[in-house]
Amino acid sequence: MSHAPLLILKTGSTHAHIRERLGDFDDWIAAGLRAGGATALATHDAQVDGLPDAPERFSGVVLTGSHSMVSEREPWSEALVPWLQAAVAAGAPVLGICYGHQLLAHALGGEVAHHPDGVEIGTVTVERHPVSAGDPLLGDLPERFPAQAVHWQSVRRLPADAVLLAGSAHEAHHAYRIGERAWGVQFHPEFSDEALRAYLDGLGPTLAQQGLDAAQIANALRPTPEAASVLPRFARLALA
């Protein structure tokens, strides 16, 4: 049975030195989607190529992370707002990751800003709320699971009709669902501990300004297979 492709909507790229060694955000997401049985994938770079085709051309869409900030309202990012609104209204399966999670919330009436307590970075513990037990994407995860995270901004106020699914000690809004088939996750299901370690290698001085020790955070990194399972599960949901 052939399906319309799953769209990986790029909102940014990783650093060149990481990309050369480990690949880019879309490569990591594609690997997770393929693990869920996706064979037809399309990638579209919103910063370079403008708007993608209409949402109904795809089986579903995954929005990547980015080094940009949603609150800066860059034109390419704001142009995605009506596209995302149309995708959710049409019932398309949507998964926003990090920047994508924040942009989806912004598009649907939420607020995004810098987190008042600064950056959350490292392997963190995400805790599901009881309401998530029946969620088709997150409901089968352990009640507490490790996940890779790196973000300075966050969803400070969820859209009015969002269902809050999970949070961490630092970040209350780690996962939410809008309607039946649109999700945002602040954590990175696509990140390996190796990828996050590569980020930490260059963030020592920046993190020290916030009283954080990059080497200590790097030493505490560990694999996050439960968080990683979100991508193959999303592929199976979108293709069902």
Image (cartoon, rainbow, N blue to C red):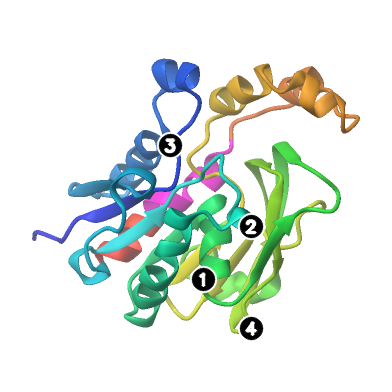
Q: Could you tell me if the residues under marks 1 and 2 are in contact, i.e. CB atoms within 8 Å?
A: no
- Tell me the distance, in whole angstroms, between the alpha carbons under discs 1 and 2: 12 Å
Residue at x 57%, y 50% (from the top left corner): 98
Residue under pointer 1 = 107
Which disc number belongs to residue 55? Answer: none
Residue under pointer 4 = 160
Q: Nearer the N terminus, badge 3 or badge 4?
A: 3
Q: Nearer the N terminus, badge 4 or badge 2?
A: 2
Q: Could you tell me if the residues under marks 4 and 2 are in contact, i.e. CB atoms within 8 Å?
A: no
Residue 197 figure quarter: top right
**Camera-nearest residue between 38 and 212:** 212
Q: Residues within 10 Å of mark 2 (few under 14, many from 20)?
A: some
- As helix, strand or loop, the secondary structure at mark 2 comes to helix
Residue under pointer 2 = 71
Q: What's drawn in magenta, residue-wise?
A: 224-233
Q: Is residue 127 visible?
A: no
Q: Nearer the N terminus, badge 1 or badge 2?
A: 2
- Tell me the distance, in whole angstroms, between the alpha carbons under discs 3 and 2: 21 Å
Q: Nearer the viewer, mark 4 or mark 1?
A: 1
